[in-house]
Amino acid sequence: MRDDAMGSAAGLRKNTARMHDDRDQIRIGCAAAVCALYALLLVCVAAGELPWASYETRGGFSMAAALMINFLFPPVLLGVGAVYGLRPQSLPEPESEPLPNPQSGASHRVADWATVRGALRAFLFPLISALPAFPLIFMLAVASDFCAVNSACTQVGPWILNWISLGQVWWFMELFAASGCIGLAATLLIRLVARLVRGLRACRRL
C-alpha cells in the first residue's frame, strides 16, 4: 500500500511538472511571437527614417510598416491570444467541486473565484502586448518631415510631429489589444463549454 501511495504521489508530481512545462512553453512561444512581430515592425519603421536612404527606399519601408499595422498585426495578435488561452493557468480548474447528487440532479462547478482570477490575469497578456505599439506607431503616424495643411505641428530636431495624427496611435493600440482579447476570450469560452460538457457526462454516468 505504501508503494502504491508513493507511486501515485510520484505520478501526480510528474503530471504537475508536465503541466507547468506545457504552460511555460505556450507562454514563451506567445511572447516570442509578439517580440518577433514588433521587431519586424521596428526594422521597417527605423529603415523608413534613415536620413541617408533615398526617398523611394524610405517610402517603401514606411508603406511596409503601414501594411503590417493594418493587415498583419490584428490577425497575428488574435491567434496569439487564442493560443495563450490554452495555458492551464488561463482557466484554472475549480479548487473545490461538489459531488453530484443523483437524487437532486447533476451538480458540477465549472468555475469559481480561482478560475475567474486566472482568466482575468490571462487578459493582462494581450493588454501588455499592445503597449510596445505606441512608440512605433507614433514614429510612423505622427513623426514626419513635413506638416500637412490645417495640422498642429511641432518640430523636434529633424522630425515634425503632427499632433492631428495622434488619434491614429490610440486607435491602433485599442485595435491590437482588442484583437488579442477576442482571441483569448474565444479560447476560454470554448474551454469552459467543454468543461461543462465533460461534467454533465460524468454526472450522467453515475
Image (tube, rainbow, N blue to C red):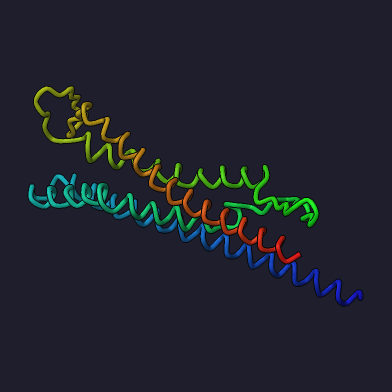
Look at the picture and state if 33 lies above or below 52: below
User: What residue is rendered at 75% in x and 50% in y?
Assistant: 96
Task: State left or right for residue 61 relative to residue 21.
Answer: left
Question: 5 or 61: which is nearer to us?
Answer: 5
Residue 154 in percent (x, y) is at: 20, 24
On the image, which quarter does residue 13 sit in? Answer: bottom right
Residue 93 in percent (x, y) is at: 67, 54
Q: Quadrant of the N terminus?
A: bottom right
Question: 119 or 3: which is nearer to us?
Answer: 119
Task: State left or right for residue 135 relative to residue 104.
Answer: left
Task: State left or right for residue 33 relative to residue 15.
Answer: left
Residue 89 in percent (x, y) is at: 60, 53
Q: Quadrant of the C terminus?
A: bottom right
Look at the picture and state if 167 lies above or below 31: above
User: What residue is rendered at 66% in x and 59% in y?
Assistant: 200
User: What residue is rendered at 33% in x and 53% in y?
Assistant: 75
